[in-house]
Image (cartoon, grey):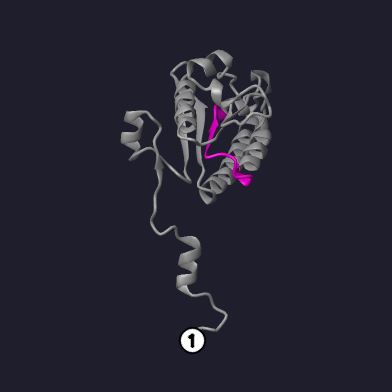
Amino acid sequence: MAKKNDVSIDDIMDEYSSGGEMTFISTGIKALDEISGGGLLEGTMYGFWGDAGTGKSSLCAQIARKFCDDGYSVLYVDSEKSLNDVQKKIYGLTKYCPKDKNAPRQLYHLDRIVTMKQCDEICNKFIDKGTVKLIIIDSITELLAKPAEDIDIEKQTIGEHARQSKDMLLKLKCAVHLNDVICIVMSQA
């Protein structure tokens, strides 16, 4: 027999179930929207990877533009420094990240984040404030990169990088899910 203070199944369902609602937001890229079921699903983290020069950053810029065009705000963590002023102009992003700090903005482009810890802190601040709908990390590989002479398999340097990225990504995945944010994590092969 259940106690009076026990939580009912209905209470649990109300608190932890979304009721089956799934909201997709179009990327503006027809083929990507088709294979993903209609766009990017809110509360989901996506991972894309590819070799250098295959268009990963171009893909990110196009998706960022579509989100901004649709009225959403985007945090673009640009550890590769691939989205310079020329690229912003080419992709039509300049109007969404004005140089005037007091002007309204939809694109928060950060290109001075160099560590996994910084990325983690910044992403969580933006999520906690409810500032953005989309987070793009371009690329996580660059946040983990070390000079070749620092990579020592014997001393577990590579293993430490893997642990840092795993911890950060698990924490970010939970925050993304609970706040209906979308996150794209790029990785260079």
Q: What residue is drawn where x is 47% and y is 34%?
A: 47
Image position, residue 114 (x, y; %): 67, 27
**Residue closest to the eye, 140 or 57:** 57
Residue 147 is one of the magenta-drawn residues: no
The answer to whether residue 20 is left or right of residue 137 is left
Image position, residue 128 (x, y; %): 63, 46
User: Which secondary structure lies at badge 1?
Assistant: loop
Image position, residue 81 (x, y; %): 60, 19
Query: Can you identify the residue that label 1 sits on?
Result: 1
The image quadrant that residue 62 belongs to is top left
> Which residue, as the protein is rendered here, is positioned at the far top?
86
Q: How many marks?
A: 1
> Which residue, as the protein is rendered here, is positioned at the far front?
103
The image quadrant that residue 105 belongs to is top right
What's the amino acid at mark 1? Met
Image position, residue 19 (x, y; %): 40, 59
Residue 139 is one of the magenta-drawn residues: yes
Q: What residue is drawn where x is 48% and y is 86%?
A: 1
**Residue closest to the eye, 44 or 71:** 71
**Residue closest to the eye, 119 or 130:** 130
Q: Which residues are magenta?
A: 127-140
Q: What residue is drawn where x is 68% and y is 23%?
A: 150
Q: What residue is drawn where x is 49% and y is 31%?
A: 68
Tell me if mark 1 has few (under 14), some (14-19) or many (20+) residues whose alpha carbon lies within 10 angstroms of its own.
few
